[in-house]
Amino acid sequence: MPEPEIEVDLSTLVGRWNRHADLEALVRAVPQVKQGGDAVVGPFHIMRRGNFVEVLSHVPNEPQYGVVKLRRDECLVLPLVLKGKWYRMIESGEKREEYRDLTRYWHERLLRFNRELLHSGKKPVVEFRHGYAAGAPRMAFEIVTTGPFGSSAYAILHGRRRGGERFGEPDGYHFSIQLGRRVEWEVRDA
């Protein structure tokens, strides 16, 4: 007897979350979720009850401002290189999120970071470097997580907000990394 068709409810995907965002990953993940099971795919929480599957999106946690001192060994660090304009805007506090295009490269890299984050139990931190020079200036920020229990370091968004082009926000589908408090690395005394 053929298995009954799975009914997927996407009705909760509203607001800045687009119900077609990361659809390819959702389509792959939904059939793999066992009866009565849950799964997290990027910013989506999938819950299967019988042949009914509910997909929830989660609003990012509220960012905090200021400075926090952290030890590097307590953190999982995502290194990113920026051009001067974006580096200065983030450094001044004018830009509070970083964007990456929705490409296979960034999908795999950010998904790998998320997996490490889930298994490590460490704080997610993004460290920006101004260019590729060996002595290039660096700065770090906490990543404001999204998803159930802060399970994702990025959100998948669609469309540019009003004024978003000023901050380099792409117009189509893109990844968004929300920045929290600035991180100062603690130095251990020898």
Image: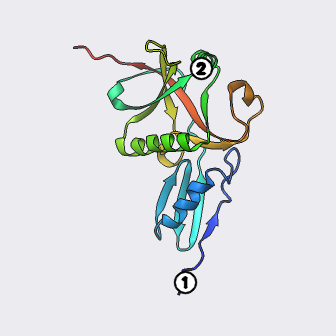
Question: SS class of the residue under badge 1?
Answer: loop
Question: Can residue 63 be seen by looking at this rendering?
Answer: no
Is mark 1 in CB contact (under 8 Å) with mark 2?
no
Spatial CA span between label 1 and label 2: 55 Å
Residue under the point 62% across and 42% down: 102
- Specify the amino acid type for callout 2: Lys
Q: Is residue 25 above or below residue 89?
A: below
Of residues 38 and 1, which is closer to you in this image? 1
- Specify the amino acid type for callout 1: Pro
Splitting the image into 4 quarters, where does residue 85 fall?
Answer: top right
Residue under the point 69% across and 35% down: 170
Q: Is residue 86 above or below residue 144?
A: above
Residue situated furthest right in the rendering: 162
- Which mark sits nearer the N-terminus, 1 or 2? 1
Mark whose residue sits in front, 1 or 2? 2
Identify the residue position indicated by label 2 in the image.
83
Of residues 88 and 13, which is closer to you in this image? 88
Q: Position of residue 129 (x, y in %)?
A: 50, 20
Q: Is residue 25 left or right of residue 184?
A: right
Q: Position of residue 26 (x, y in %)?
A: 57, 57
Residue situated furthest bottom in the rendering: 1
Residue under the point 48% across and 13% down: 137
Q: Position of residue 83 (x, y in %)?
A: 59, 20
Q: Position of residue 106 (x, y in %)?
A: 54, 39
Q: Residues within 10 Å of mark 2 (few under 14, many from 20)?
A: few
Identify the residue position indicated by label 1 in the image.
2
Q: Is residue 186 above or below residue 157?
A: above
Question: Can residue 148 be seen by looking at this rendering?
Answer: yes
Q: Is residue 111 left or right of residue 161?
A: left
Question: SS class of the residue under badge 2?
Answer: loop
Q: Is residue 63 above or below residue 37?
A: above
